[in-house]
Image (spheres, rainbow, N blue to C red):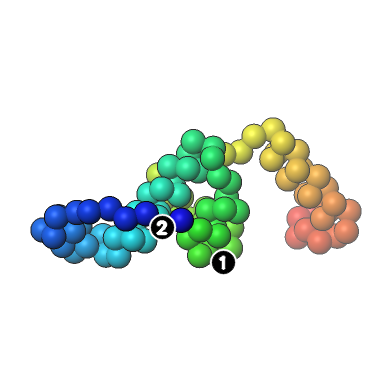
Amino acid sequence: MQIQIALPDEVADSLSAKWGNLEHKLMEMIVIEAYCEGSIGLGKVRELLGMQTRLEVDTFLKAKGVDLTYNEADFEADRKTHEQLRKEGRLNTP
């Protein structure tokens, strides 16, 4: 879907000077809002903004002042992953 908006030239010029590419800035704003309200997850944020890694997404959201969602299920998944890596000897911890 494509959405078009009309802005007066002076407003568009002013915002472009401040933000750069307005289309990209609007996409970022929509993606951030959708993530914050729980409509999309981190994977979709990465996809929509053309980022390569989860770390890029985390860094982007942190720079925008957005807290990452992290719940009990995430913690449990991380704990299991940590345990599996420990059993495989793939952690550099004593």
Query: Which amino acid, by three-letter code, is at mark 2?
Result: Gln
Q: Is residue 77 visible?
A: yes
Residue 68 visible in the displayed image:
no
In this view, which residue lies farthest toward the left? 10
Q: Which circle's residue, 1 or 2, is located before the other in the chain?
A: 2
Residue drawn at (72%, 36%), measured in percent from left and top?
73
Q: Is residue 30 above or below residue 9?
A: above
Q: Label 1 to label 2, Cα distance in Å?
A: 24 Å
Total of numbered circles in the picture? 2
What residue occupies the far right of the structure in this picture? 87
Q: Nearer the viewer, residue 2 or 74?
A: 2
Residue visible at 37% across and 54% down? 3
Residue 31 position, x and y percent, is 45, 49
Q: Which residue is mark 1?
A: 52
Instruction: Identify the secondary structure beneath mark 2.
Output: loop
Q: Which residue is mark 2?
A: 2
Q: Is residue 11 left or right of residue 47?
A: left
Can you give x and y, in whole percent of width and height, for residue 41 in the image? Answer: 58, 46
Give the quadrant of residue 22: bottom left
- Amino acid carrying label 1: it is Gln
Label 1 residue SS: loop
Q: Nearer the viewer, residue 57 or 45?
A: 45
In this picture, residue 45 sits left or right of residue 25: right
Q: Horizontal placement of 8 versus 21: left or right? A: left
